[in-house]
Image: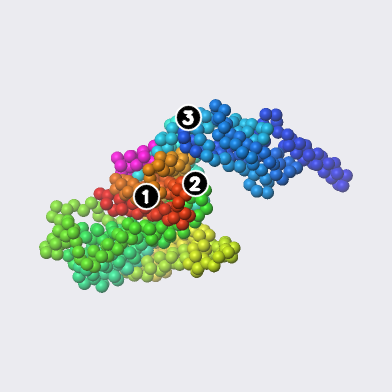
Amino acid sequence: MIRLKTPVLLISLLLILGAGRVLASPPEGEAPFSVKLPQVALSGVPFSLTIHPSLAAFLGQDSLPTSYQVLDGEGKVLASGQKSFSLSESPDIEIDKLTLHHAGSNALTITVGAHSQSASLHTIPAFLSLVPPLLAILIALISRQVIVALFFGVWIGVTLIYNYNLITGFFYTFDKYLISTLANADHVYILVFSLVLGGMVGVISKAGGTQGIVERMSAYAKGPRGGQVSTWLMGILIFFDDYANTLIVGNTMRPLTDRLRISREKLSYLVDSTAAPVANIALVSTWIGYEISLINDSFQTMGVEQNAYLTFIKTIPLNFYPLFSLAFGLMIAYMLRDFGPMWHAETRARQTGHVLRADATPLAKLDDEAMIADENTPKRSRFALIPVAVVILTVSLGLLYTGWDPGMEKIGASSEPLSAFRKLSIIIGESNSFSTLMWAAFLGSLTAIVMATAGRVLKLTVAMEAWVSGIRAMTMAAVILSAAWMIGDVCGELFTGAYVLQITSSFLLPQLIPLFVFITAAVIAFATGTSWGTMAILMPIAIPLAHQAPTLDPAIGEAHAMLILLSTTAAVLAGATFGDHCSP
């Protein structure tokens, strides 16, 4: 046995040394480095490339000082410099601010030290990067089908990326971009959270929990003022989903408001003024997963390491339209002040008892067996309050749990005294919000199912059917979410944000970006009737624009730049909600 080991060891050593010689001497003509290029470049818009030296270049040494140069097809120097590659750090070198001015297939020559490598980069006219989002907007305006619009925009974008080939673009839309989107762990977290929270809403609604809240509050409504304020409060309490809010508050409060001679127009306004706005800014809702996923994707595209959940929280005070909508709804309900057509509707209802116009035709009957409890089901508010409380508590504790260790480490490394609020912000900023939201959704669903079955309100089969129905109600949102991620990836690869920044930087002040974005979001949402579709189209463009534009003005400090970024993010959310409210 011992005699056999020695030759084996010798042979192994010789093989290793031989391999080392092969690695140290790459085949003739083969450069000891690789180059990562973008899939496409825009004419006149800067892009970057990454040079990655092979391990063979480092054999026997830890660092490798060398020069680099990038030439275009005409021999013009695009970039050059010195770089000391090091194994102890990231050996890659990223060369940015490269610009090609001719559309087509541009030849590049990358030289590192004494070795050169040729590459080809597909370049398109810069204005074409606006085609996918603009086409998505146009199709949404015409068809009012945001899913079709988003997928069509993705298809055209992928076609532009892959050399204008419509067939390749069509197939890559699904087998490359859709699969890549669904393979992203953060995306899966958000999809699961949204679907499971929808399931929880289905269970607590079927168990009579949400209607129990409404009936308890409606007991205090003795007149028009009390009826309107109670309706507003119900909209605030059912904050976790705008669809559930509209469905439950509208259906449950309608008999009460009819009895109190409150017009259906006023009921519709009060319900609508709380449904989307409160879901938009709530710390836990079916909206928040979607919103933070769009914010997080934009940050990843820019290479910014920032917690999307904490960013969302910081946008709430700047999300003016939802806040004003909620405040104005309460003011109108309490003061009983009405204007224009609403005044005529309220006067008609008070004087004649006709809560509907004589020629009115309700657009829809909000009646869903999966969301409305049976008539003989007891309406107990605890079946809604406790599961929602579990979700909120889980999110709060989960953020502290996942962010505690890295947050305390960061706090300990700080050289300046920090306030308690600042420490809490750091801990939340270091937390894993995606995992926390998913834990909360599952615990909330489990609590709702256990309470409904243990309390003998629902059979387990009925509870699970309600849970699945709640998930089914979120399917459309999941599809929109996936399409939104895809068009965000496409806009990122097409440098849409960089091009918008380039063409607007000459006339659009960074301080005006939030206003510009709000108006754009409001117009798109008004025309399409969808908040989520508007966010999907604008967020991948607006956030990079707001992040990069302040860097062009040296007078804008870091704090001011962050305020512009937060205001712009809030402007997308606010404009999307505003347009959705006003849309017919």
The magenta segment = 131-145
Q: Give how far across and how far down residue 48 sits, in percent.
A: 54, 39
Sequence-first disc among 1 and 2: 2
Cα distance between the residues tagged 1 and 2: 23 Å
For residue 528, side relative to residue 109 (left or right): left
- The residue lying at 35 percent from left, 50 percent from top is 515
* Position above or below: 539 against 432: above
Q: Is residue 501 one of those drawn in magenta?
A: no
Sequence-first disc among 1 and 3: 3
Residue 234 position by quadrant = bottom left
Mark 1 or 3: the one toward you: 1
Residue beneath label 3, please?
A: 102
Helix, strand, or loop for circle 1? helix
Residue at the far right in the pictured view: 3
Q: Give how far across and how far down residue 551 sits, in percent.
A: 47, 48
For residue 23, side relative to residue 168 (left or right): right
Residue beneath label 2, please?
A: 301
Identify the amino acid type marked 2.
Thr
Identify the amino acid type marked 1.
Leu
Is residue 234 in view from this perspective? yes
Residue in front for this viewpoint, 53 or 209 = 53
Helix, strand, or loop for circle 2? helix
Residue 160 position by quadrant = top left
Q: Give how far across and how far down residue 16 sits, in percent.
A: 77, 40
Mark 1 or 2: the one toward you: 1
